[in-house]
Image (cartoon, rainbow, N blue to C red):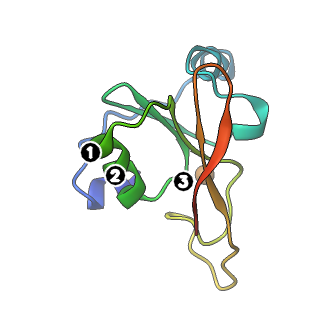
Amino acid sequence: MGHLRANGFGIDSRDLADSKLRDIKIKYRITDKLISCHTAVVDGYVFEGHVPADLIQRVLKEKPAIAGLAVPGMPIGSPGMEGPNPERYDVLSFTRDGKVSVYARR
Ligand SMILES: [Cu+2]
Protein backbone atom coordinates (compact mmCIF):
# COMPACT_ATOMS: atom_id res chain seq x y z
CA MET A 1 0.00 0.00 0.00
CA GLY A 2 2.85 2.36 0.81
CA HIS A 3 4.30 1.60 -2.62
CA LEU A 4 1.06 2.65 -4.31
CA ARG A 5 0.65 5.77 -2.20
CA ALA A 6 4.23 6.74 -2.99
CA ASN A 7 3.33 6.43 -6.67
CA GLY A 8 0.41 8.81 -6.41
CA PHE A 9 -2.51 6.40 -6.01
CA GLY A 10 -5.26 7.38 -3.60
CA ILE A 11 -6.00 4.27 -1.55
CA ASP A 12 -9.15 3.23 0.23
CA SER A 13 -7.86 0.21 2.11
CA ARG A 14 -9.89 -2.32 4.07
CA ASP A 15 -9.07 -5.37 6.13
CA LEU A 16 -11.72 -8.01 5.61
CA ALA A 17 -12.65 -11.24 7.31
CA ASP A 18 -11.40 -14.29 5.41
CA SER A 19 -14.89 -15.18 4.17
CA LYS A 20 -15.39 -11.70 2.69
CA LEU A 21 -11.95 -11.79 1.18
CA ARG A 22 -12.77 -15.09 -0.49
CA ASP A 23 -15.91 -13.52 -1.98
CA ILE A 24 -13.79 -10.74 -3.45
CA LYS A 25 -11.29 -13.20 -4.94
CA ILE A 26 -14.16 -15.15 -6.53
CA LYS A 27 -15.90 -12.01 -7.80
CA TYR A 28 -12.74 -10.78 -9.51
CA ARG A 29 -11.73 -14.23 -10.88
CA ILE A 30 -8.61 -14.54 -8.77
CA THR A 31 -7.93 -18.25 -8.87
CA ASP A 32 -5.70 -20.20 -6.47
CA LYS A 33 -2.66 -19.90 -8.70
CA LEU A 34 -2.97 -16.10 -8.77
CA ILE A 35 -3.70 -15.53 -5.13
CA SER A 36 -1.70 -13.23 -2.88
CA CYS A 37 -2.18 -11.20 0.28
CA HIS A 38 -4.19 -8.25 -1.00
CA THR A 39 -6.43 -7.22 -3.84
CA ALA A 40 -6.67 -3.76 -5.39
CA VAL A 41 -9.37 -2.65 -7.82
CA VAL A 42 -8.55 0.40 -9.94
CA ASP A 43 -10.73 1.65 -12.81
CA GLY A 44 -12.28 -1.81 -13.14
CA TYR A 45 -8.93 -3.62 -13.25
CA VAL A 46 -7.84 -6.00 -10.51
CA PHE A 47 -4.32 -6.00 -9.10
CA GLU A 48 -3.55 -8.96 -6.90
CA GLY A 49 -0.55 -8.92 -4.61
CA HIS A 50 2.65 -6.91 -4.92
CA VAL A 51 2.26 -5.63 -8.50
CA PRO A 52 4.81 -2.93 -9.39
CA ALA A 53 3.20 0.50 -9.77
CA ASP A 54 4.68 1.14 -13.22
CA LEU A 55 2.82 -1.91 -14.54
CA ILE A 56 -0.43 -0.74 -12.93
CA GLN A 57 0.05 2.61 -14.63
CA ARG A 58 0.74 0.90 -17.96
CA VAL A 59 -2.48 -1.12 -17.74
CA LEU A 60 -4.53 1.93 -16.81
CA LYS A 61 -3.06 3.81 -19.78
CA GLU A 62 -3.14 1.05 -22.41
CA LYS A 63 -6.42 -0.55 -21.23
CA PRO A 64 -5.66 -4.10 -22.44
CA ALA A 65 -8.44 -6.70 -22.67
CA ILE A 66 -7.57 -8.39 -19.38
CA ALA A 67 -9.22 -8.58 -15.96
CA GLY A 68 -6.04 -7.60 -14.20
CA LEU A 69 -2.52 -8.44 -13.07
CA ALA A 70 -1.28 -10.68 -10.30
CA VAL A 71 1.96 -11.43 -8.51
CA PRO A 72 1.14 -14.73 -6.81
CA GLY A 73 2.48 -15.29 -3.33
CA MET A 74 4.79 -12.69 -1.81
CA PRO A 75 8.11 -12.85 -3.70
CA ILE A 76 11.10 -11.25 -2.03
CA GLY A 77 12.10 -8.24 -4.11
CA SER A 78 8.61 -7.22 -5.18
CA PRO A 79 7.48 -3.74 -4.08
CA GLY A 80 6.89 -3.74 -0.34
CA MET A 81 8.81 -7.00 -0.02
CA GLU A 82 12.32 -5.65 -0.47
CA GLY A 83 14.97 -7.94 0.97
CA PRO A 84 18.64 -8.83 0.78
CA ASN A 85 18.17 -11.68 -1.73
CA PRO A 86 15.57 -10.55 -4.24
CA GLU A 87 13.96 -13.30 -6.36
CA ARG A 88 12.95 -13.06 -9.99
CA TYR A 89 9.20 -13.18 -10.31
CA ASP A 90 6.57 -13.11 -13.02
CA VAL A 91 3.78 -10.61 -13.17
CA LEU A 92 0.82 -12.47 -14.66
CA SER A 93 -2.15 -11.11 -16.56
CA PHE A 94 -5.48 -12.90 -16.35
CA THR A 95 -8.79 -12.61 -18.11
CA ARG A 96 -12.31 -13.09 -16.82
CA ASP A 97 -12.50 -16.42 -18.65
CA GLY A 98 -9.36 -17.72 -16.97
CA LYS A 99 -6.54 -17.15 -19.45
CA VAL A 100 -3.26 -16.51 -17.63
CA SER A 101 -0.11 -15.21 -19.34
CA VAL A 102 3.17 -13.65 -18.32
CA TYR A 103 2.78 -9.87 -18.60
CA ALA A 104 6.21 -8.92 -17.32
CA ARG A 105 9.25 -10.43 -15.60
CA ARG A 106 10.97 -8.70 -12.73
CU1 LIG B 1 2.05 -9.31 0.63
Distance from the alpha carbon under mark 3 to that under mark 1: 19 Å
| Tags 2 and 3 touching, CB below 8 Å | no
Residue 5, horizontal then vertical, whole percent: 29, 54
Which numbered disc, 3 or 1, marks the residue that appears first in the sequence? 3
Q: Amino acid at mark 3?
A: His
Q: Amino acid at mark 1?
A: Lys
Q: Position of residue 28 (x, y in %)?
A: 55, 21
Q: Residue furthest bottom?
A: 84
Q: Residue at x 51, y 63 (%)?
A: 80
**As drawn, is 27 to the left or to the right of 14?**
right
x%, y% of residue 23?
62, 14
In front: label 3 or label 1: 1
Q: Which residue is disc 2 drawn over?
A: 58
Q: Secondary structure at mark 3?
A: loop
Q: Amino acid at mark 2?
A: Arg
Can you identify the residue that label 1 sits on? 61
